[in-house]
Amino acid sequence: NDVPSCNIIHVCAVLGYNQEKDPLFWNTWAQHTLKNALTLQKLNQNTAKNLILFLGDGMGIPTVTAARILKGQLSGQSGEETQLEMDKFPFVALSKTYNTNAQVADSAGTATAYLCGVKANEGTVGVSAAAVRSQCNTTQGNEVTSILKWAKEAGKSVGIVTTTRVNHATPSAAYAHCVDRDWFSDGEMPAEAVQAGCKDIARQLFENIPNIDVIMGGGRKYMFPKNQSDVEYPGDKKHFGTRKDGRNLVEEWTNRMKNKKAQYVWNKRELLSVNPNNVDYILGLFEPGDLPYNLERNTETDPSLTEMVEVAIKILRKNPRGFYLLVEGGRIDHGHHEGKAKQALHEAVEMDRAIGRAGLITSIYDTMTVVTADHSHMFNFGGYTPRGNTIFGLAPMLSDVDQKPFTAILYGNGPGFKVINGLRENVSTLDYQGTNYQAQSAVPLRMETHGGEDVAVFAKGPMAHLLHGVHEQNYIPHVMAYAACIGQNRDHCMSSGGASSLSPALPSLAALLTLTRLLC
């Protein structure tokens, strides 16, 4: 945290810009930041008892910057000088997001990278690049395991919390091995794939890794028999169950866990009535599909990401061996795909709030927390806007080509492309600060696309300094496993007995020869 203890940023916001006109202001702030940086020379080499990965789906660097400004403006400040919770993390790296067969990645292949430690093809989860999307017969023998499984095998409690479906691309790579990210239930699978023995993702959630301690998100309809009505929307057919095999996975889970301290919940009231001290396992499915955008959330019935994360950590942290928790702010991505920057940025701000809450109920001494994205988006903002300009506002000048105003936020492609009588639409006639306004784009597409640039990785806690520089995305779970002494990274822990000052273990000669052969 490079904010001085006297909260110089807040003073500046209150007093206006007079402070900023004085060089002493900037020099004092920079010197304070320098003193904080110097304290980082003493590295935290403790063993990480707990691991938390916050994944902002589609949260590229422009999204982080814009969310920072929005967060500040929501609290009455100009915004640029604000700090997100993730900004306070002491170590930052860049992650190269490409898939093995894609320059611009998707969320499935990337999830395999930052969860399983192996880069993979787009559209596939929990399988290596030898597996081919949608080809069932390429699954067997190409499965790769995730850090969630490594943690479970080490005796830790494990959890998944997401604002999307619990069987969506990001969470599914933590437990599933599937050649198609869209095989949510057997109702979405081709008959030949089912007949060939491939399993849908919802089924794998309950069968692959027994007793995942915490599961929270959406995706209720994929757990119930086809045409079974939903508990929350009983008259809406689009929310009916989708399973062709007739299985009720929620009922099966409830029956299997009846002799354990387990609870199934489907709304906010039930979730917040849970006493974490009396519950060891929780399955929370709060919507038939994805959870609603935070701006549209029914605060009486739908839990926020922050509320889900708090309950999850309080349940998981009871395990004396610690825990691994994957948290996805999944609808940042959806907002961008729809060209709805306001939805996307509010999702990012909510995820940052969850990061802050997690920080309050864990310790940097024994908890490694990493915040990153799977990929970026074709989202940006510019136009020489003045200080404090609302992030959703107009640039201060008209276009010198068509003499029309334009918003600071624009997309490279997407649904916001509008031409009226052969000319660009005049945004001043629209509610460009509306919740569902679709920002203008250069190229017309029904859905905006991902971006291909590197994304940020923020890290704090034990061994966080190993996340530095520019890395391949699949490096992330290897660092986290090393910090926690799980998976293939345990040798260095033996001499220290799990205490601090973890020393690197030398790789075997065979491993070095193999790597040399690969590189040559």
Image (tube, rainbow, N blue to C red):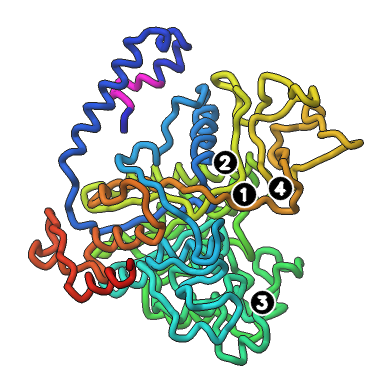
Picture residue at 43% right of the left edge, 50% below the top: 372
- Marks 3 and 1, Cα distance to the nearest angstrom? 24 Å
On the rendered structure, is 359 left or right of 39?
right
Magenta range is 3-9
Q: Which residue is mark 4?
A: 414
The local crowd at label 3, few if under 14, some if 14 to 19, many if 20 or more residues have their Cα within 10 Å, is: some
Which image quarter holds the C terminus? Answer: bottom left
Q: Amino acid at mark 3?
A: Glu
Q: Amino acid at mark 1?
A: Tyr
Q: Is residue 155 visible?
A: no
Query: Which badge, 2 or 3, is on the more N-terminal residue?
Result: 3
The local crowd at label 1, few if under 14, some if 14 to 19, many if 20 or more residues have their Cα within 10 Å, is: many
Secondary structure beneath label 3 = helix
Secondary structure beneath label 1 = loop
Q: Amino acid at mark 4?
A: Gly
- Marks 1 and 2, Cα distance to the nearest angstrom? 8 Å
User: In the drawing, what numbered circle is on residue 293?
Assistant: 1
Picture residue at 24% right of the left edge, 58% below the top: 483
- Marks 3 and 4, Cα distance to the nearest angstrom? 26 Å
Q: Which residue is mark 3?
A: 188
Q: Nearer the viewer, mark 3 or mark 1?
A: 3
- Marks 2 and 3, Cα distance to the nearest angstrom? 31 Å
Query: Percent position (x, y) of residue 179?
Result: 55, 76
Say if 360 sits above or below 11 in the image.
Answer: below
**Does the residue at mark 1 contact the one at mark 2 (Cβ under 8 Å)?**
yes
Picture residue at 55% right of the left edge, 77% below the top: 132
User: In the drawing, what numbered circle is on residue 346?
Assistant: 2
Secondary structure beneath label 2 = helix
Picture residue at 51% right of the left edge, 33% below the top: 71
Query: Which badge, 1 or 2, is on the more N-terminal residue?
Result: 1
Q: Quadrant of residue 12?
A: top left
